[in-house]
Image: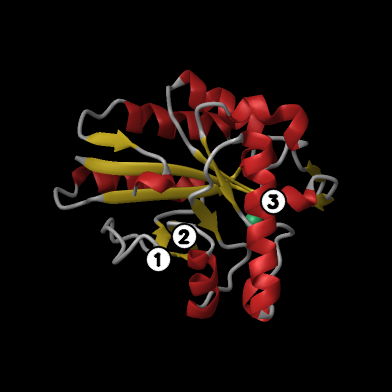
Amino acid sequence: MKLFAFAIDDGTVFDEKVIDIFNRYGIKATFNLNSGLQDYVWFKDWLEVRRIKLEEKKGIYDGHEVASHSLTHPYLTSLSDEDIRREVEEDINNLKSVFHCDIKTFSFPFDGYDERSIGIIKSLGITHIILPCIDDSFRYPDDAYHIKATSWDIDDALCKVQRFIEDGEAELFVYLSHSYDYEYGDSYAKLEELCRIVRGRQDIKIINVKDI
Ligand SMILES: [Zn+2]
């Protein structure tokens, strides 16, 4: 059986639309949230990107995996050990108190990671870490603390999923994206197409990142 995981970073207001699609296809995804940025607003060109207010909207994540993406989305590798611990531990504790569930997965903010930060994150009870880099070999990672994304982009994912289907040796596809990408690119229909393709295969099992 091949495994496929959908993961969404940042917890923006567009998660609601993406979850609508996932729910229609019976897909359980992993949402990597920053509990300390709920009032943060930025613009991707013309698009205003707001964060989800977790207490108000927590119900939308029902049935999906909630995971940590750090408290305030810093470059962890530039922080002291103590600050890394605070960024991860406070986020985990906040998410636990909102969602009343275990937090097992962590997704690195931005594009920096190192073994020092991985070690600290591990020590806080995280069992699965998504690194900010691509590996499209469709192989399992060496261990669950070094999971890499297969794709970050919907057009790229739609191409790669065909290779994934045809490759008899393929094991794992991790599709990591942001919900604002679909709003910005008006590409919800493409996400839906990917869901339809993956959901329609008997040989692909959709899993949460914590189950890799
Ligand atoms: Zn992020």
Pick the residue in front: 40 or 80: 80
Question: Where 158 falls versus 198 (above or below)?
Answer: below
Q: Of the residues under marks 2 and 3, which one precedes in the sequence?
A: 3
> Residue 70: x percent and y percent?
65, 58
Q: Secondary structure at mark 2?
A: strand
Number of other residues with Cα within 10 Å of mark 1, as a class: few under 14, some 14 to 19, many 20 or more: some
- Callout 2 amino acid: Ile
Q: Quadrant of ligand 1?
A: bottom right
Asked which quadrant contains residue 197, the reply is top left
The number of callouts visible is: 3
Contact (Cβ within 8 Å) of mark 1 with mark 2: yes
- Residue at mark 3: 34
User: Looking at the picture, how far across and down is residue 11, in whole percent?
Assistant: 67, 43
Q: Describe the element under mark 3 as helix, strand or loop.
A: loop
Q: Residue at x 82, y 51 (%)?
A: 42
Q: Amino acid at mark 3?
A: Asn
Could you tell me residue 13's position as x and y percent? Answer: 73, 35
Instruction: Confirm if mark 3 falls within 8 A of ligand 1.
Output: yes
User: On the image, numbered disc 2 is attached to which residue?
Assistant: 129
Residue position marked by numbered label 1 in the rendering: 146
Q: Earlier in the sequence, mark 1 or mark 3?
A: 3
Q: Residue at x 53, y 56 (%)?
A: 106
